[in-house]
Image: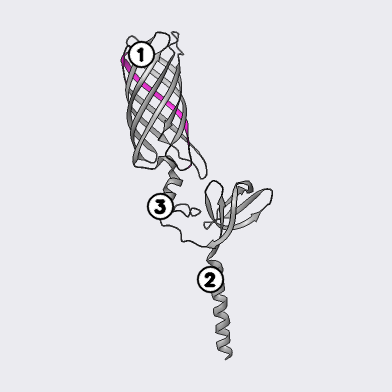
Amino acid sequence: MKKTLALLVFAIISIGSISAQSMQDVVYLKNGSIIRGMVIEIVSDGNVKVQTADGCVFAYPMTDVQKIQKEQSQALPRYNKYPYHHYSSKEYHDELYGWGNAPRFRGFVELNNTFGTSASWRNRFGMLASFGYQVFPYLYVGAGTGFDYWTDYSYWSVPIFAHLRTEVHKAYRRNVSPFIDTKIGYNFVNWQGLYFTPSVGCHFYFGHSNIGLSAYIGFAIQRIDYDSCRDLRIGASLDF
């Protein structure tokens, strides 16, 4: 009888222990993110700290927290490199790469202004469009065309170019991805010659959407018949 009673007590304790182990704290943020783990500290006018299954500790302002509750533990997806994510495959992919998920079709529509830095002061503004593929999460390959209007001469040039962009994707919960961008091709119409525009900038994306905005600064290196221009260019583009 005593043996049976001891086994029953042991079983009840084991079941309770397993049940407790299968529960975890879940923090829902107002931006839609979900963090699972163990809440180790809450400061009413400060932060909530969550320790994830891999031992990492993350702190979030209480003003960003929608709710905190206990839920059944979920097994980590085998594709998940970051144990604090518990999303579906598509959600995880979008969270990791954002608008840069690959492979997929991608395009840019850009406005720019070029400030003549040489003695001849060849100022110009332009509009470009580029379409291609995000071949890898960190590499876009495409081609495009557009126009430059040279305000000091009332001339036009129409570049046709190959377009490469490599990006450093957002860290967890960040909305900015730095990039290096290069367009190389040839200009036609009034002024003709080599067209080359290396630049650096940042992409600002809208949540997990493929649509975002980019801003950059770089150089417009242009061969025009008898001379070469090496001018400062700034621009912005709608990315999709």
Type of amino acid at the residue the image marks with label 1: Trp
Query: Which badge, 3 or 1, comes first in the chain's sequence?
Result: 3
Q: Residues within 10 Å of mark 3 (few under 14, many from 20)?
A: few
Relative vertical location of residue 197 with respect to residue 48 in this rendering, above or below: above
In the rendered image, which residue does mark 1 sit on? 156
Q: Quadrant of the C terminus?
A: top left
| Disc 3/disc 1 C-alpha distance (Å) | 48 Å
Q: Residues within 10 Å of mark 1 (few under 14, many from 20)?
A: some
Relative vertical location of residue 90 with respect to residue 121 in this rendering, above or below: below
Name which quarter of the figure residue 127 lies in: top left
Q: Nearer the viewer, mark 3 or mark 2?
A: 3
Q: Residue at x 65, y 55 (%)?
A: 41
Element carrying mark 3: helix
Q: Which residues are magenta?
A: 186-207
Type of amino acid at the residue the image marks with label 2: Ile
Q: Quadrant of the N terminus?
A: bottom right
Q: Is residue 195 magenta?
A: yes
| Relative to 98, 135 lies left or right | left
Q: Residues within 10 Å of mark 2 (few under 14, many from 20)?
A: few
| Relative to 57, 121 lies left or right | left
Element carrying mark 1: strand
In the rendered image, which residue does mark 2 sit on? 18
Q: Position of residue 21 (x, y in %)?
A: 54, 67
